[in-house]
Amino acid sequence: MTPANSLATRVAELAATRPDDIAYTELRYRMQERIPVSITYARLHSAAGELAERVRDESAPGDRVAILCAHGLDYAVAFLACLYSNRIAVPLFPAAGTRNKERLLAVLADARPTLALLSYGDSTSASVLGPMLGQVAELPSDVTAPSADSTEPIVEPLRAELAYLQYTSGSTQSPAGVRVTHANLTTALEQLRQALTPRNPILTWLPFFHDMGLILGMALPLYCGVHGLTMSPAEFAKRPIRWLRAVSDYRAGITGGPNFGLALSVSATTPQERAGLDLSGLDMLLNGSEPIRPEALTEFTEAFAEYGFRHRAHTPGFGLAEATLTVTISDWRDEPMVRQFDRSALAEGRAVPPTAETHPLGATPLVGCGAPIGQDVRIVHPVSCAELPTGRVGEVWVAGANVCDGYYGRPDATAEAFHATLRGSDARWLRTGDLGFWFDDQLFIAGRRKDVIVVDGRNHFPGDIEATVEACATEIRPGHVTAFGHDDGRREDLVIVAELRIVEAIEPAELSVLARRIRNAVAAAHEVIPGSVMLVEPGRIPKTTSGKLRRGECRARYIAGQLDPVAMI
């Protein structure tokens, strides 16, 4: 049976009841000119149905269909076509030469698609990836143009099977395909609809092959019947003002952006570009990046308050692909919650505010990520698997209909992450791998369990140390610092790798002075002396495609001597 409120059914209903309303708009750019390209509900439904017929002809039930379309309307049509034809979508991205070839090949080898959907004229993906794509089907050159032989699309009944495989970004491990069922997707969209109650346009630049872009940016507007708008991440990166200008002009009520997006919008826009912005209609700027930095929220508000942006529009949350995106979210009507915690107590697993006796550098600010939206969320001791009380740091566990059923083709990893048991509960629990705690009825995230650095028996959270480095040295690129532990066989030492903004702007003799300043600041704030501080050129620190630090990969490159520092102490 097709769930009454599934995404495929919802689009079909809107095509019947509001056929001429604009469903989605892709914002394209030619130099300074913005070119909106829109598609109605009726045409979106027809285009997806036409492509679904081809997908059915060239694949069988249970087959995987890789989506490597360009960001925008093509992607929405391709994803819906997979839902309409009841095939398992694999959201990916076009090959851009050899830059992202390794990741794409790894995912394709795991997913083994029968068919790949490409945008019209994309010869690069086929030549770079070859037979790993399976059969290749190109979309029409213009999906908004009606077909001459268009017929009423068929939406096949959805079985209780997979809708798509959401491949993780690889920040903590090699990419793994999360098995997202139709029920998971519908549950996640309904949870967000109830929590956010969208009425005005939803606009994002987040890539559709990532869970936040796919669900918040593409699926939620269609599910809720509100105008969806998107621009490619590349267009945002070229000129960040495009994002805010579009939010202003289209009166978007909801958007989303991680820390680095907020920071780039502040640093890479000028007062002249900001002139005339009106952000007063923006109710929610969702942020679920890892970790959410208080200063990123504050600096964005300071930069754009005079243009109508309200600080309460910052809407922090916590989620992961294994839970179909969202686990907790802040109430969009309230100011974001930022609290100070005693750093030493936090390292011991206790979340307590600093006291009058706490050293000025002994407090760390953290951002609350809100409360669960239709799920059960517990804080659990990662070893004893016993639930912990409020104010104690443990692993975040999640249970609910939005939690996926495992990793594709990885039974051992599935059993470890998705089949945890909690004393006194019959539920199947997801172990997120994230450490957090409850405080003032909100979830706070302390860091990743696998990333915790242990030096001389004390725990240190890398995100906390990285924030200290950024605060003490404006010469360092924000969001481009990584801290990790390295065991040389005798002891575990703290290693810090930081990218410089502009290498040429610093005299060679000053580089070692900067490295010592960083070491002293970390030692004073965290009571641990870094064994090594390494300054590197921009782009040397490995990150995921969503901008998250790959600390494990950075550690491996450090050990292998592949970071090529410009200075090191």
Image (tube, rainbow, N blue to C red):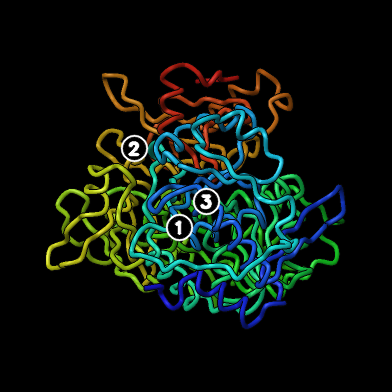
Instruction: Mark 1 vs mark 3: give the one in front.
Output: 3
SS state under label 1: strand
Residue 358 is situated, as x and y percent measured from the top left of the image, at 38, 54
Instruction: Mark 2 vs mark 3: give the one in front.
Output: 3
Instruction: In this rendered view, identify the residue nearer to me: 311 or 159.
Output: 159
| Residue density around tag 1, few if under 14, some if 14–19, many if 20 or more, within 10 Å | some
User: Would residue 548 be found to the left or right of residue 324 on screen?
Assistant: right
User: Would residue 24 be found to the left or right of residue 364 on screen?
Assistant: right
Amino acid, disc 3: His
The residue tagged 1 is: 366
Label whose residue precedes the other's in the sequence (2 or 3): 3
Amino acid, disc 2: Ile
Asked whether the viewer can see residue 399, the reply is yes
The residue tagged 3 is: 210
| Residue density around tag 2, few if under 14, some if 14–19, many if 20 or more, within 10 Å | many
SS state under label 2: strand
Instruction: In this rendered view, identify the residue nearer to me: 531 or 35.
Output: 35
Give the position of the N terminus as an image quadrant: bottom left
Asked whether the viewer can see residue 357, the reply is no
The residue tagged 2 is: 453
